[in-house]
Structure formats: structure tokens, C-alpha cells
Image (cartoon, grey):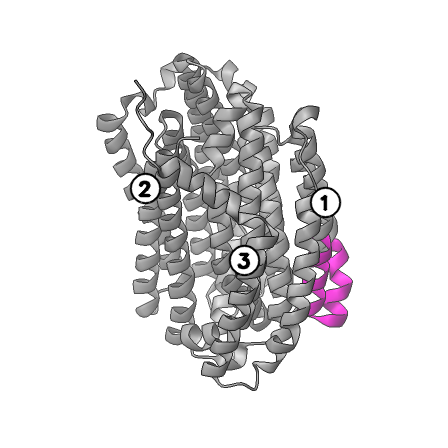
């Protein structure tokens, strides 16, 4: 693992997650401020966007498999093979984009507003917005293939910068459009336009900086396209699992509980998604190293990377999730100017879910980056499908709390399954241990038990008192977690890597 490259990737990931946080901080308040019935309008926009997000599973499947395989082949010295994978993926994506553009036009025959129970948009505007969202997903497939291709030549941070630039432009464009009370169709058009512009920027950049990444269909063949369908399909299933996790619940809540509850769910979830960016940085930064070590079968270094990254993530999970829970009243006040939206029972459940997700996402990184994800894909899709069906009764009787409890139970079960897959990823002599996770489970239960009373108490505390309480709890948790999860070893490793090496005669 090259420390210099790791820091470059870490910086790019920080910037990428920072852009995500900016988007999450900027767009929802604009909806609430510049549209009448803002939270309902925001809920309807979430539902409309969620209704086509499942199409993105093809994007994740193709570009993730292709970029991993290109990197593995390039690391082994097979440049022609890497170019062939890129060309085959490009052929497949061009076919998908053409299909989306043609078949997607059928949305103009669908009663979108009645299906999604939309009341703040006309039928024609909803249909046009939906079609533009479909085109956006199609163009994003090509853009993602281009930006992830930088990983092949050891420049994943450059691809991250390009993707961050596109999302930043899209965010500010959305905010500007919302400020002017733009229709849903204009908002979708802004997102599509930013993708087209940055796709052109990437093509110009690789032509001069990394010509080997310039797409060329002549390296591939239609027969070669069929070889990437099956492994890409498993990544696609993982992406479908993402749709079932993040988008399908929005549609389900919109149809059962209405736009206002959907908006509240989206805002509470966004708060903890913002905090989880910190956990995702620790996990996603090591993606390229996992792929290269897997390609070389360097089990010693891969096992060491697993151990060190696990310690960092386990340290962060209780500190970040409990800290976010206790700072939620401040976030709702400063972010939305609506402290009354802080509901401790919803935020507490979402904090626990966020912590479990942090563990799972770190572990699945090893499956995805090594292209050993076939079993994982079926666990995710089948599991979330069953979870959503099982949530129908709790939603009916207990509302949003019923859904969150059902979601939490499934995330705990699924994390246990992922841990078993991680154990099988390594040879027997390098098998991973479960002892650190047992310590995390005990530590987290104690941390959340201690935070439960302050979380409910903060409804009555002033903001300064709540901030002081949150900071005090986080400092105590951080000091305890540092010792419990052995962060001294990680700190010593980084210090030793940064010391100048002595020159011996």
C-alpha cells in the first residue's frame, strides 16, 4: 500500500464526500423555503426520483465490474485485455442508452401523478421530468465508466475529482432552479445537463493526460460483451439492493403514509447519511489497494489492510453515530430552521441503523473490490425484498417507527451474513477474526444505552446546553473507543511510514 497514493485518494474522497454533504445541506432547505407546502413538495420530488432509480443498477453493475477488471488486468501487464474490457463495456452501455431513450418515452403514456399520488405537479410536467430522469441515469452510466477508468492507471483520485465537480455543478444548478420556483422537469434537466458537460470534460482530459483511457470500440467485440454480462449482472443485483434500500421505501411510504411523512423520513435519513460520509471515507479509500492486492494474491498485505481499516471504522462508528444523534437538534435548527422536526425516537433508530450500515459497508468493500460478489448480490436483493414485504404490517400499525425497526432487524441479520462471506474470502491461514466485532457490539450497546436519556432530554434543553452535552459525550466515547479498538497500532504505522527512510551504505 503506497502511502502517498493513499493520501491522494483520501483527499479526493474527503472532497467527494464534502460535495455530497453540500448537496444534502443545500437542496432540502431550498425546497422547504421556496415552495409552498415545502416538505410535501420535497417528499414528492423524492418519490418521483426514486421511481426510476432502479435503472441505475445497470450502471453500477457494468462500470464497477469493468473498472475492477481493467485494474486487475493492467496490474498483471495485460494492457490489451484491459482495453478490450473497456470497449466491451462501452458497447454494452451504448446499447442500453439507446434502449432507455426509446423505451423511456413510454412514460408519456403512464398516469404518473395518480400512480405516485403527486399533487404538486401537473401530469404532463411529471411525465417530462420522469423521462429526463431516465435519460440522466443513462448518461450517468457512460460518465461513471469514464471516471472509474482512472483507477486502471493509478489515478482514482482524478476520477473522484471529476465526479465531484459534476455533482457540485448539479447541486448549485438545482439550488438556483429551486430559488426560481422551477418545475420538476427543469430540475431533472439541470442534472442531465451537468452530466453531459462533464462527460465532455473527461474525454478532453484523458486524451491529453492518459491516452490509454480514451475509449476505442475497435478493441472489443460483441462476443466479448457477453463475457461481462454475468459478473456485471451480480454487481447490478447489488445496485438493485441499493434501490430496495434507499428508493423503494420512499415509494412505499409515499403511497401508504403520504408526502409529508415521506419528507420527514427523507430529512432524518439525510442527517445520518451526512454523518456516515465519514465512515464511507474510511472504507472507500482502500478500494484500489484491495483490487491490486487481490490481483497479486498478496494475502499478507490484504489481511493487514483488513485489520487496520477495521480498527479505524470500528472506532468511528459509535463516536460518529452517537455524536450525530445528540447534535441532531442543532442540525435541524441551523439547517432547516425547524427544531420541532427533531423527533428523538426516529433519530435514535436511524442512528443505530447508520452504525450497522457502517459496519456492513466496510465489509462489503472487500467483496466488491475483489469481484467476489456473486453470493453477496443474492443476499442483498432477496433479503431487502423480504424486508420490504415484512415491513407492510409494522408500517400499517406503527407508521414510520414500524418501518425503521424492521429495517434495523434486517441490517443486523445481513451484516452477520456478510461477515461469513468475508471469512471465506481469505485462505484458511489468513482467516479474519470476529473478536473485534464482538467488542464493537458490546461497546455500541453501552454507548447507545448511555445516550438514550440525553437524546430524549435534548427536547427540553437549550441549544448551548445540548451542544455541551453532545461534545462531552463524544469526547468520552472517542477516548474509550481509541483504547478499546487499538488505534495506537494504526497511529504508529502511519508515523513509521511518514518518517524518512535512512540511507544505508
Total numbered labels = 3
Q: Residues within 10 Å of mark 3 (few under 14, many from 20)?
A: many
As displayed, is residue 69 above or below residue 375? above
Quadrant including the C terminus: top left
Q: Residue 500, position in %: x, y?
A: 32, 34
From the image, tell me which residue sits under label 2: 162
As displayed, is residue 186 above or below residue 229? below
From the image, tell me which residue sits under label 3: 112
From the image, tell me which residue sits under label 1: 416
Residue most toward the front?
Answer: 505
Q: Residue 237, position in %: x, y?
A: 62, 37
Q: Nearer the viewer, residue 281 or 310?
A: 310
Asked whether the viewer can see residue 273, the reply is yes
Q: Residue 305, position in %: x, y?
A: 53, 35
Q: Is residue 402 magenta?
A: yes
Camera-side mark, 1 or 2: 1
Specify the segment rendered in magenta: 389-411
Amino acid at each position: 500500500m503506497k502511502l502517498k497514493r493513499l493520501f491522494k485518494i483520501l483527499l479526493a474522497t474527503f472532497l467527494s464526500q464534502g460535495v455530497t454533504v453540500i448537496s444534502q445541506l443545500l437542496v432540502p432547505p431550498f425546497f422547504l423555503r421556496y415552495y409552498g407546502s415545502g416538505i410535501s413538495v420535497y417528499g414528492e420530488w423524492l418519490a418521483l426520483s426514486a421511481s426510476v432509480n432502479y435503472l441505475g443498477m445497470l450502471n453500477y453493475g457494468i462500470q464497477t465490474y469493468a473498472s475492477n477488471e481493467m485494474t486487475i488486468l493492467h496490474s498483471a501487464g495485460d494492457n490489451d485485455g484491459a482495453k478490450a474490457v473497456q470497449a466491451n463495456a462501452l458497447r454494452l452501455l451504448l446499447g442500453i442508452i439507446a434502449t432507455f431513450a426509446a423505451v423511456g418515452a413510454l412514460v408519456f403514456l403512464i398516469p404518473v401523478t395518480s400512480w405516485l399520488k403527486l399533487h404538486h405537479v401537473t401530469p404532463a410536467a411529471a411525465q417530462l421530468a420522469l423521462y429526463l430522469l431516465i435519460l440522466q441515469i443513462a448518461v450517468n452510466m457512460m460518465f461513471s465508466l469514464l471516471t472509474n477508468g482512472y483507477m486502471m492507471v493509478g489515478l482514482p483520485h482524478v476520477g473522484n475529482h471529476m465526479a465531484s465537480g459534476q455533482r457540485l455543478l448539479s447541486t448549485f444548478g438545482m439550488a438556483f432552479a429551486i430559488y426560481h420556483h422551477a418545475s420538476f422537469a427543469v430540475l431533472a434537466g439541470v442534472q442531465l445537463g451537468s452530466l453531459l458537460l462533464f462527460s465532455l470534460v473527461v474525454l478532453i482530459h484523458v486524451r491529453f493526460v492518459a491516452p490509454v483511457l480514451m475509449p476505442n470500440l475497435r478493441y472489443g467485440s460483441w462476443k466479448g460483451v457477453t463475457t461481462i454480462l454475468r459478473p456485471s449482472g451480480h454487481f447490478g443485483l447489488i445496485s438493485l439492493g441499493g434501490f430496495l434500500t434507499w428508493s423503494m421505501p420512499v415509494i412505499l411510504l409515499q403511497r401508504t403514509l403520504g408526502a409529508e411523512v415521506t419528507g420527514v423520513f427523507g430529512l432524518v435519513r439525510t442527517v445520518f447519511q451526512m454523518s456516515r460520509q465519514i465512515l464511507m471515507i474510511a472504507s472507500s479509500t482502500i478500494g484500489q489497494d484491495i483490487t491490486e492486492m487481490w490481483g497479486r494474491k498478496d494475502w499478507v498485505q490484504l489481511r493487514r489492510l483488513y485489520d487496520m481499516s477495521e480498527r479505524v471504522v470500528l472506532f468511528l462508528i459509535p463516536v460518529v453515530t452517537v455524536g450525530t444523534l445528540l447534535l441532531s437538534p442543532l442540525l435541524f435548527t441551523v439547517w432547516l430552521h425547524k427544531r420541532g422536526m427533531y423527533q428523538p425516537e426516529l433519530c435514535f433508530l436511524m442512528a443505530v441503523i447508520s452504525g450497522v450500515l457502517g459496519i456492513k459497508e466496510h465489509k462489503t468493500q472487500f467483496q466488491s473490490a475483489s469481484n467476489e460478489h456473486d453470493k453477496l448480490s443474492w443476499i442483498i436483493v432477496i433479503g431487502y425484498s423480504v424486508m420490504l414485504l415484512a415491513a407492510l404490517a409494522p408500517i400499517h400499525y406503527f407508521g414510520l417507527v414500524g418501518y425503521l425497526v424492521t429495517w434495523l432487524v434486517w441490517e443486523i441479520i445481513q451484516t452477520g451474513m456478510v461477515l461469513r462471506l468475508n471469512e471465506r474470502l481469505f485462505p484458511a491461514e489468513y482467516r479474519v477474526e470476529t473478536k473485534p466485532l464482538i467488542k464493537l457490539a458490546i461497546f455500541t450497546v453501552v454507548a447507545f444505552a448511555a445516550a438514550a436519556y440525553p437524546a430524549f432530554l435534548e427536547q427540553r434543553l437549550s441549544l448551548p446546553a445540548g451542544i455541551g452535552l453532545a461534545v462531552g459525550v463524544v469526547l468520552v466515547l472517542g477516548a474509550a473507543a481509541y483504547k478499546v479498538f487499538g488505534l495506537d497500532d494504526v497511529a504508529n504505522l502511519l508515523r513509521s511510514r511518514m518518517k524518512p527512510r535512512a540511507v544505508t551504505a
